[in-house]
Image (tube, rainbow, N blue to C red):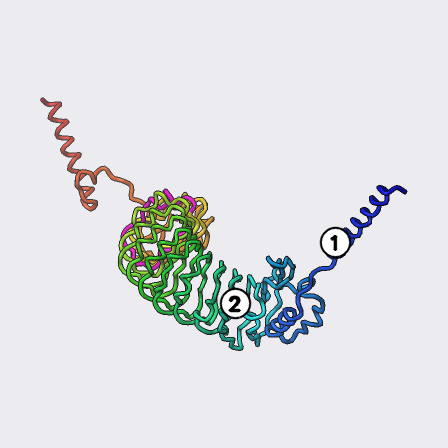
Amino acid sequence: MTVVSIFKLALFFTLTSTLVTISLQQEQPLLLNSAEQDSVYQVLSSINSATNWRTLFPDDLCSYPPHGVVCDYFTDPTTKNVTVHVTELSFGYVSDFTPNPSCSPNSTFSPLLFTSFKHLRKLFFYQCFTQTQAFVPVIPTTFGSSLEELVFINNPAFVGPLSGITGNFTSLRRLVLSGNGIHGAIPNAIGDLANIEEITLSRNKLSGKVSVNLSKLKKLKILDLSGNGFHGNVPSSVGNLTHLLKLDLSSNGFSGKIPESLSNLQALDFLDLSFNRFGNFGVPLFLAAMPRLKEVHLSGNLLGGEIPEIWGNLGGILGIGFSNMGLVGEIPASMGLHLRNLCYLGLDNNKLNGKVPEEFGFLEFVNEINLENNNLSGKLPFSANFTAKVGEKLRLKGNPELCVDEKLSHRESVGELKKCSKPDIPNPVLFIGVSHSGLLSSSSSFLVLLLFWGLWILLA
């Protein structure tokens, strides 16, 4: 065997050995370190102590995790060593499609959540803290730089100030705290979450004025503060959130005038300011300059005035809630003419008068119209097919002067309306100013005159 042959053979065995070594390394998955694994077990026990998690999931929790526990690989930039860590923890059974570990009524909040998972990106709790009170913990300043989603939904026993939750969350994209026992004012630190895309703080016990400056939140797409106890004016800085798609401030105590700066929200498609205490300034005319709106709800604010003619550029609107607003005057026919995609229209409990626009009867996609408790009058202009399509969601009661054609009176949705009386047949005598009661005598006098005139012509 030549030297060259021996060299080639040695090279072959070296390469083969290297490939086998690499293959074996790839087949052996990286394991979660024992301290982090133990912390996961303790957190699982805190939300449901009746389950023996160590027995149910005895193996590595990154290789064989329960649903809701997610891991990822990380490479040290200096040593190039690869490690594995927990990045997502989701608790609370949502549905068969997201069967997270279920929570017991006496779930507790483990402080390990904010100390043992330095690489955590998502923390999610759904209906976990429902009976036993769980207090908002003090979050260490060393935690949170990697957290992107913090979600607590329907945890009424999760109580404490909102200021206790906002930590060093420089990467936070979603802050969803809905249906909890969070109280107090919105801390100024919220205005520093430069990467935030969603802030949902609905259905809590938050209160006070919203004085935080929101101008820095350039990436914010959803702002939902509904169902709290906020009061005072809506900050004009909301108008700087030019990427906002949804703004929901409903069911609070906001007052004053709806800020004109909202007209800057050109991307907005959902606006709900209903059930606040906005003053008698009328329906905002700037709505006409928001062409991407799909839903606008102002119900429960006594804005007063007439419904303005602003609908020409709002053809994409699907829903309008203008109930109980103290509106007067007639319903503009232009609403039916321009809002061709409308599905829901609520104008009930106002002081609207005049006729129902016949243009409403040509709205192809509408499935609910509520005109109850106004002063509408005249004949309902809808066809049998239209009333059948909308059905019981065509709400018209409380308009005593509104009537319905006899052929529609059997329809359940319009059954409470009175039948329109048959129109009188026109009588030509009425055009010469003769009263109905004197019709017979007037006609006789006219015939006698005509007879004398004819005799005079014959004898002349």
- Residue visible at 73% across and 59% down? 28
Q: Which residue is mark 2?
A: 143
Up/down of 141 relative to 333, above or below: below
Q: Nearer the viewer, residue 281 or 393?
A: 281
Question: Which tag is nearer the camera, tag 1 or tag 2?
Answer: 1
Label 1 residue SS: helix
Q: Amino acid at mark 2?
A: Phe
The quarter of the picture where residue 75 lies is bottom right
Side of 47 where 284 appears, left or right: left
> Residue 448's x, y, as percent?
15, 34
Q: Earlier in the sequence, mark 1 or mark 2?
A: 1
- Quarter of the figure that contains the C terminus: top left
Q: How many marks?
A: 2
> Residue 37's x, y, as percent?
65, 69
Mark yes or no: residue 370 visible: no
- Quarter of the figure that contains the N terminus: top right
- Residue visible at 59% across and 71% down? 103
> Residue 337's x, y, as percent?
36, 42
Dot label at residue 22 = 1
Q: Nearer the viewer, residue 273 or 359?
A: 273
Queried whether the magenta region covers residue 445, the answer comes back as no
Cα separation, mark 1 vs mark 2, equals 36 Å
| Structural crowding at the residue carrying mark 1, measured as other residues with C-alpha within 10 Å and reported as few (<14), some (14–19) or many (≥20) | few
- Residue visible at 51% across and 65% down? 144
Q: Residue at the left extreme? A: 460
Q: Nearer the viewer, residue 238 or 376?
A: 238
Q: Residue at the front extreme? A: 3
Give the magenta part as a residue range: 319-341
